[in-house]
Amino acid sequence: MAGKQRWDAKRAREVLPKILLMLVWVFASVVASQFIVGYLMLWILGPERLSEAVWMAVLSAISYSIAIVLVLFLPQKTKLITRTNRTELGLKGLPTWTDIGLAPVGFIAYMLIASGLVALFELFPWFDAKEAQDLGFSVLMLGMDRVVAFVTLVIIAPVAEELIFRGWLYGKMRESLGVWLSILLVSALFGLVHFQWNVGVNVFAMSIVLCGLREITGTIYAGTLLHILKNGVAFYLLFVVGLL
């Protein structure tokens, strides 16, 4: 038992700094890329032009691209984080019919978990489940502006976020921490970067299912499809029907 405790302590000293580094690195990369690009474009374009759908789309595309480069490629230059590969990123092979079929099943599971967590958090007076999320796009958009917003929110954002969180971060963490603790930490960080309690709780629930789908399939394809489905439903309700 004493030997095992010494091994555990040694293992902890080896693993915890690496885990902390990865969590901080992903958080800093995602947040910094958004703020730096956002303020730079605000300074160049001004608030009125930046509020246009096409420029918001450009901002999102550049921010996500920088975050992906920072997360997926820059850490490979350090000795603390090992080089990544397609299998570790969850990009092995191509999407299958199983991935397609699991996406709506996962969506139902996510909705059930999210509903339970929101109901629990509503017990606290500071939690506002109906607080609106600022997506950067006007709900009054029509025509091509709506198409641009759709591509940004329903395609670009899910693909980029799955690569970063359920791809690189989860792929790295599960090697050291195992499945369950990795799922909790990745999901907690994913909720944190949304900077809003009700949104954070919702996407925390979604991330749990997304990580589970990666465990089931070995890839991020089913999770990416689920994420696209979720954002697509939200887009329809917000920008088309106007219910949210």
Image (spheres, grey):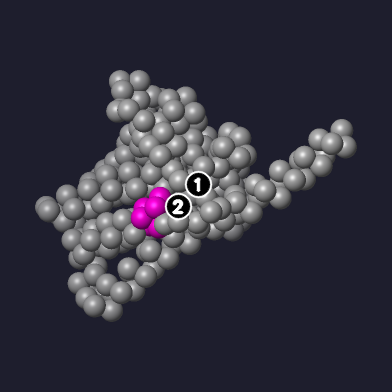
Q: Position of residue 34 (x, y in %)?
A: 37, 64
| Residue in the foreground of this view, choosing between 186 and 178 | 178
Q: Quadrant location of residue 184?
A: top right
Q: Position of residue 198 (x, y in %)?
A: 50, 51
Residue at the farthest left position = 143
Q: Identify residue type, mark 2.
A: Gln
Residue 200, compared with residue 114, is above or below; it is below
Callout 2: 10 Å neighbours few (<14), some, many (20+)?
some
**Where's the N terminus, which quadrant?**
top right
| Residue in the foreground of this view, choosing between 35 and 86 | 86
Q: Is residue 213 visible?
A: no
The reply to whether the C-beta atoms of the residues labelled 1 and 2 are less than 8 Å apart is yes
The residue that label 1 is drawn on is 82
Callout 1: 10 Å neighbours few (<14), some, many (20+)?
few
Q: Residue at x 49, y 39 (%)?
A: 171
Q: Position of residue 67 (x, y in %)?
A: 38, 57
The residue that label 2 is drawn on is 76
Dot label at residue 73 = none
Residue 181 covered by magenta stretch? no
The main secondary structure of the magenta stretch is: helix
| Residue in the foreground of this view, choosing between 44 and 71 | 71
Q: What span is colored magenta in the figure? A: 67-73
Q: Position of residue 215 (x, y in %)?
A: 49, 28
Is 107 left, or right, of 175 in this rendering?
left
Q: Identify residue type, mark 1.
A: Thr
